[in-house]
Image: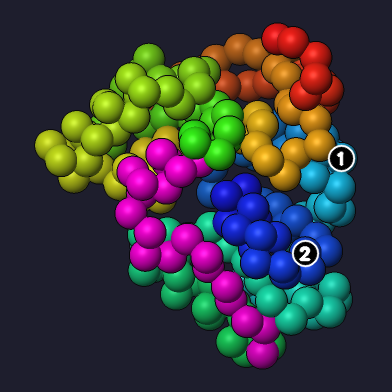
């Protein structure tokens, strides 16, 4: 969502949000929320399979000339997107690439991003207590400590943690979680959202 925000700020015309059915289990478990994210951003959402060929086919079908990603720190992820785009002559634009993660997190909070942790892998550093919590000053402090002490990727690009943006400047309405539960599989914890709505930003919490 931060990459989308920056792309829109730059004046790019974004016609679709692409959900790739791969990676974070929490995102896949909560994929029903995509309809709400589409509504609040007023951008259509499309879903692609996890294989590169599936993503290429969808990009061609949509007539896309640019694919925007949120890659920030991981060269393997950058290469993965470039490998998708190059054969079909689609530009890969990563507005966050090279940005220092802790600075990016601070920028997002300053801009009014509300970021919910919906998945953690405690074997990679994150605290169990983060699950189901919004990133605040205390979590940011712990992320900084884990980055310096354990070398954890502080933006979570290696699967340390995954998030859901509840509110940000490009949302017309904020996402409110009404009912959820947590589940654990060994070191991995997930938030399973069972009920959520879009709520006017004028309405008080």
Q: Which residue is drawn at the image coordinates 24% and 35% (left, top)? A: 144
Residue 57 visible? The answer is: no
- Name the residue nearer the viewer: 126 or 190: 126
Quadrant occupied by the C terminus: top right
Q: Is 104 a magenta residue?
A: yes
- The quadrant in which residue 84 appears is bottom right
- The quadrant in which residue 18 appears is bottom right
Asked whether, in this view, residue 175 is left or right of residue 81, the answer is right
Residue 66 visible? The answer is: yes
Q: Is 92 a magenta residue?
A: yes
Q: Residue 98 carries which label?
A: none
Q: Residue 39 carries which label?
A: 1
Disc 1 crowd rating (10 Å Cα; few below 14, some 14-19, many 20+) is: some
Q: Residue 14 carries which label?
A: 2
The magenta region covers: 89-108
- Name the residue nearer the viewer: 124 or 74: 74
Q: Where is residue 16? Give x, y as percent.
A: 80, 60
Disc 2 crowd rating (10 Å Cα; few below 14, some 14-19, many 20+) is: some
Asked whether, in this view, residue 44 is left or right of residue 95, the answer is right
């Amino acid at each position: 969502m931060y990459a989308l925000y920056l792309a829109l700020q730059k004046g790019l015309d974004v016609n679709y949000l692409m959900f790739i059915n791969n990676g974070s289990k929490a995102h896949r478990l909560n994929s029903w929320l995509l309809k709400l994210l589409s509504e609040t951003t007023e951008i259509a959402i499309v879903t692609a399979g996890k294989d590169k060929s599936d993503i290429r086919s969808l990009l061609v079908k949509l007539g896309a000339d640019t694919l925007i990603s949120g890659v920030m720190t991981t060269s393997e992820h950058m290469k993965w997107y470039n490998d998708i785009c190059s054969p079909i002559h689609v530009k890969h634009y990563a507005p966050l690439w090279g940005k220092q993660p802790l600075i990016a997190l601070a920028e997002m909070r300053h801009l009014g991003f509300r970021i919910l942790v919906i998945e953690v892998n405690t074997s990679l550093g994150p605290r169990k207590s983060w699950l189901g919590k919004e990133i605040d000053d205390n979590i940011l402090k712990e992320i900084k400590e884990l980055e310096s002490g354990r070398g954890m990727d502080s933006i979570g690009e290696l699967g340390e943690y995954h998030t859901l943006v509840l509110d940000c400047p490009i949302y017309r309405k904020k996402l409110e979680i009404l009912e959820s539960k947590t589940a654990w599989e060994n070191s991995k914890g997930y938030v399973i959202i069972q009920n959520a709505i879009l709520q006017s930003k004028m309405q008080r919490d």
